[in-house]
Each structure stands twice: as structure tokens, then as C-alpha cells.
Image (cartoon, grey):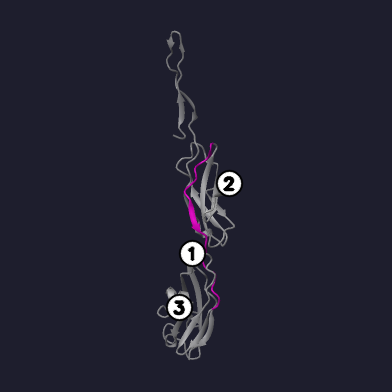
Amino acid sequence: MAGDSIYAKVSATNFYGESALSTEGNGATYTTVPDAPVSIAEDVSERTRNDLKLTWSEGTSNGGLSVMDFRISQRFQGDSYQVIASGISQTSYTIRGLYLGAIYEFKVEARNTNGYSSASSDFTILHAIAPDVPSTPTTANSGTNVVITWSTPLDNGSTITSYTVTIMHSDGSTYTEDLVNCDGSDSSIVSATQCTIPLSVLTYPPYFLSSGDYVLAKVLATNVYGSSEASSAGSGATII
């Protein structure tokens, strides 16, 4: 197997016969190309709007020689693979210039002095990040209710799955959700980007708003890649 020493013995033959075998000698080793890299993954903490960082490990065998470097090939949504980087001396690499919402495939090869390994398994990923911050919501009186309305922010490549809507307490600094009337994980609220809360709810714990107080709300958006920051506080409605 790769890395094993190669041993040899020699005998000589003439008209009168064959000699005994020599003492065994060695010096050469059996070498081949490395095994394909394994454990291809993304370092999610390094993902940005246009970049992602891949990591991987060397295969089981280096072919009996030290791995010198790696190269990465990429294809975009089923196109042909193209080498995008070579001579990579570490087991990680940041790929730049990607598009949000696009599906990419990557594979990695290792190289020693005998040449390149076979390619790793394909690593497929949707390049996306958490949504943008929603714009400032509005609150409006509607009979005995308050209607909170917001706009859908950029989803940055992955569909928004929920919102978190919080309303300010009478202390002027604390915000909490009303999960009975304004549960931002409810699909109907997600699609409407709007929820309705009875005024009476806001005059009781935990809000304790009083007649004449403004109703302020903040909204943040969530997709499978994370949550945005909360919007600025929006108002418009008052307790009447």
C-alpha cells in the first residue's frame, strides 16, 4: 500500500547454476496520488452577501507523499465544473463573487508530487443570508383594534418563514410579542404582513398602556439562515 518500502533480492545465474539470493535491499517506497478530500462543509460564521468559506479534510491516505496543495472546482446550477482556485495550501478557502439565491456545487482535489487525487463528493449549497431589516412598521386605529402593518424586506435568497412583532410597554423601553393576536410564525400573518390586536389587550399586562398613549411596534424577519435586526419603532395608533 502507499508508503510501504519496496524490498528486493537478487540472484545470479551462469552455465553452472544459480547463486543464492542476496541480502534484501530497499530504499524506494510505493507511492500514488492522494485519496480524495472528505468532509466538505461550510463555515457558516464566515458567510456574507457575496462570499462563503469552504472547509475540508485530507483523505485517509496521502499516497505515501505529503499533500502539497488543493484545488477547487465550482459549477452554477447544473453548468459544467470550472476550476476556480488552485495551489491552496490550507484545508479551507473563501469563495467570492457569489449571487444570493443561486445554487452552487463545489468539489475539491488534493495534490502530491504524483498528481491530483480524484474529486471529493459534490458539495451543494443555496447561497443565502438572513433577510434585510424590515422598514419601519405602522400602527393604525381601526375601531376597537390596532392594526400593525409592515412591508416584506429583501429575503436575500431564502424565503421569509416568520416575523417577530413586538409592542412597547408603558415603561417606554420594553418590547414583547402578543402571540395570541400577532404570532409572526402564523402563515396567514406572514403572507399578509399585518396583524390586528384589540386595544383592550394593550391596556392590560404586560403592556399597561393608558388612554392617549401611542402604540409603538418593531418587526424583524426570519428565514432558514437567520433573523434580521429589528426595525425602527413605528407608531400611528393611540389608546382610545
What whole-number distance in Å separates the C-alpha atoms at marks 3 and 2? 51 Å
The kind of residue tagged 3 is Thr
Return the disc, 1 or 2, that comes first in the chain's sequence. 2
The kind of residue tagged 1 is Tyr
Q: Is residue 131 magenta?
A: yes
Q: Main secondary structure of the magenta part?
A: loop
Q: Which residues are magenta?
A: 114-136
Do tag 3 and tag 1 residues touch (Cβ < 8 Å)?
no
Element type where label 3 sits in the image: strand
**Identity of the residue drawn at 45% across and 8% down:** 15
Q: Mark 3 = which residue?
A: 176
Q: Mark 2 = which residue?
A: 86
Element type where label 1 sits in the image: loop
Q: Which of the labelled discs sits on residue 225, or is there none?
A: 1
What whole-number distance in Å separates the C-alpha atoms at marks 1 and 2? 29 Å
Which mark's residue is nearer the viewer, 3 or 1? 1
The kind of residue tagged 2 is Ser
Q: Is 111 situated above or below 30?
A: below
Q: Within 10 Å of the Cα at label 2, are there few (<14), some (14-19), or many (20+) other Cα atoms? A: some
Residue 123 in the image: state x and y as whole percent: 48, 53
Nearer to us in this view, 13 or 206: 13
Residue 147 in the image: state x and y as whole percent: 48, 83
- The residue furthest left is 180
